[in-house]
Amino acid sequence: MSLYQISNPQGNTTSTGFVPACQTAPLCGQEVCDTSLSITERVKSLVDSLTLEEKILNVVDASAGSTRLGLPPHEWWNEATHGVGSAPGVQFTDKPANFSYATSFPAPILTAASFDDALVREIASVIGKEGRAFANNGFSGFNFWAPNINPFRDPRWGRGQETPGEDSFVVQSYIRNFIPGLQGDNPNEKKVIATCKHYAAYDLETGRYGNDYNPTQQDLADYFLAPFKTCVRDTGVGSIMCAYNAVDGIPACSSEYLLEQVLRKQWNFTAEYNYVVSDCDAVTDIWRYHNFTDSEEAAASVALNAGTDLECGSSYLKLNESLAASQITVETLDRALTRLYSALFTVGFFDGGKYSGLDFSDVSTPEAQALAYQAAVEGMTLLKNDKNLLPIRSSHKFKSVALIGPFANATTQMQGDYSGTAPYLISPLEAFEGHSEWEINYSMGTEINNQSSSGFASALATAKKSDLIFYLGGIDNSMEAETLDRTSLTWPGNQLDIIDQLSNLHKPLIVVQFGGGQVDDSPLLQNKGVHALVWAGYPSQSGGSALLDVLIGKRSIAGRLPVTQYPASYADQVSVFDINLRPTADSSYPGRTYKWYTGKPVIPFGYGLHYTHFDFDWEQTLDLKYNIQNLVASCQSTGPINDNTPFATVKARVKNVGSEVSDYVGLLFVSSEDAGPVPRPNRSLVSYTRLHDIAIGTKGTLEFPLTLGSLARADESGSLVIFPGNYKIALDISESLIFEFSLQGDPVVIDTLPMPDAQYDFTVPVHIQPPSTEAHS
């Protein structure tokens, strides 16, 4: 189900606030509220007290509770991708009433471009605090279905904007900071429950309800499952959402391989409060679109048996029929309820807790507003700057400025998808009009995806009477969103036409490109009349102010693209349904992401210019050679050997030799031309960090922690292996610094991925699905 098919409760909604369940009658008299018992005993008593009908009514997202027992209902569907977002469980009142808004941060794809892990944690901490304030006061539930951690595999994907980009390592780093920020540091006493979604190999809207993908074990380990492993193994996340699609012919929400063998047994997702929730209507789709089962109740049965504890939807309401047909057991139903109520104990649903005092005074604080602005600033990325036109200083003596394009007066358009109501939305036009040095001339000119040129004449007239031209365009949620993939990577509509005409006026022209997915900027990069190009993503509530301050040099620009910008021809060359990452030996398939793509990108992953210049030198590198066995043995004192095991720290000095104070993002890549099986990655990002406000003539030190995982990649079975060979580490895509070293000895496995069984036993007849080559829904 699309989020945008949901009509949220709006208006003058009032709430008396949420009172912890055990502080209300008659539940307070039940054994579940006896604090002398353990949480395990209390949960068991509650589950045992429910009738069969009540049990079934409480394994769907709109859980009914029990009027008989005094157990309150709970809506599990709440969203928080980049702020408390609209969802069935979230109620925004009318402004200016309390709980009429929440801080709206930039879309994750823009935040990811900051390459600033501390920023990610701060953002998530604010979202968690505001989400709990909403929950405490009855305006949301206590769990939130965020983050979206599917890597941005295909540039046409409509939901790539919700993710931290195409690189699995960046996604893993994002998770390590977002989850503890959102939940808090104690998994037994959370602010809110986070949910990593969508498990697994979901990254396409076209035919999403019925698609099947058969990724190799190698790609599963390296890419599709790596973020979920980090989420489960390393962060204490409360829940996981299973995806719409099938993997290896079995719908994800009914996959014993994904939910039991990998998730629970391999990654130890076994705390009493750990539960799996389905994407909305994904259980129904097991039958409706995948045709995996012959009936809806059979779909409910295979999902519950596999370990999907909570359904977003209504098929689980047929579990009484499943029981009657002996397709499930009451014990399996009780297992799901036990996990769900154990989870609610961790957020004070029954007893309250240390976060129960959070209220509207903790929402959209001045600190939160400043953070939303900071995030927008840090993600913006400079892609072109001929003759150092930017930043626009007073010395340029531009008096009149033309502001043209479909994003020039954008407000909600700047939020992207999965947004809530923001406290305010500062459009570029509003921000620019507040800049006292400029007279602003505004004309929209054209729309995002329109062939009408009726607005061109007005826009050109506006530009002709101005000294400086800004064109603000790109793509928005009319082009990319949930349920909506793009079919083209070109600039949509006639935007290139109007940009070309503006460029022929022979005036300074700056193009600002909005949107989550990239478009082919080749025409702009080649056009000498386009002097500068900035990618601004979806910058949200302070987007206009952040953009202005970056353009005039009040704030430095230092973002890096978290995705590859492919040529438009890529959309014709590669099917969205081809799940493979690695290129073919004959180059008929060019591969995906910067690691594997064999073509020439328009702009590569990790690219970003600055307003100043830097010099670099190594401060601390690695040994020239290592014996792999000795290296792994020497790391055992730090704990279990896996891809997280610390290995070394590389340091590089950065000196600002230009004329502007600036942040700097350092990216450290590793590559090898002879280690491990072919094909080999072009390069792999293994560490990054961001330095802030490097003054002119001063130095900063980039510290790059490395792990054994930095040296490993998956073999054909999905095991992470450190292979012998000659390696190179390089600073940034430009390879400003390089250092070569070798690994010697035999390969060493540092992590494994279970192989799927040859077949699985289901309690109903099932039909294994072939891989999708076209939309199946």
Image: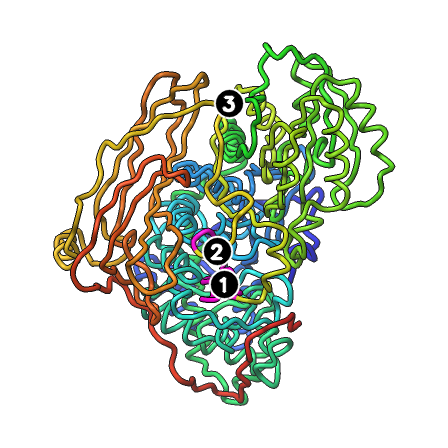
Q: Nearer the viewer, residue 129 or 401?
A: 401
Q: In which quarter of the image is residue 236?
A: bottom left
**Image check: 36 left or right of 531?**
left
The image position of residue 717, as x and y in percent, is 34, 72
**Image check: 36 left or right of 162?**
left
What amino acid is found at the position of numbered circle 2 in the picture? Thr
Tag nearer the camera, 2 or 3: 2
Q: The N terminus is located in which quarter?
A: bottom right
User: Label 2: which residue?
Assistant: 598
The image position of residue 379, as x and y in percent, is 51, 35
Q: How many marks?
A: 3
What is the secondary structure assignment of the residue under circle 1? loop
Q: Residue at x 56, y 32 (%)?
A: 384
As displayed, is residue 355 above or below residue 365?
A: below
Identify the main secondary structure in magenta: loop
As displayed, is residue 657 above or below residue 359?
A: above
Alpha-carbon distance for marks 1 and 2?
8 Å
Category of crowding for the residue at label 1, using alpha-carbon neighbours closer than 10 angstroms: few (below 14), some (14–19), many (at least 20): few
User: Label 1: which residue?
Assistant: 587
Question: Residue 555 bears which disc, if any?
Answer: 3
Category of crowding for the residue at label 2, using alpha-carbon neighbours closer than 10 angstroms: few (below 14), some (14–19), many (at least 20): some
Q: Nearer the viewer, residue 405 or 6?
A: 405
Residue 413 counted in the magenta span: no
What is the secondary structure assignment of the residue under circle 2? loop
| N-terminal label among 1 and 2 | 1
As displayed, is residue 564 above or below residue 495?
A: below
Q: Give the range drawn in magenta.
A: 579-595
Q: Of all residues shown, which one is farthest toward the front?
A: 586
Q: Are marks 1 and 2 in contact (CB under 8 Å)?
A: yes
Specify the color scheme.
Answer: rainbow
Q: Residue at x 24, y 64 (%)?
A: 749
As displayed, is residue 526 above or below residue 21?
A: above
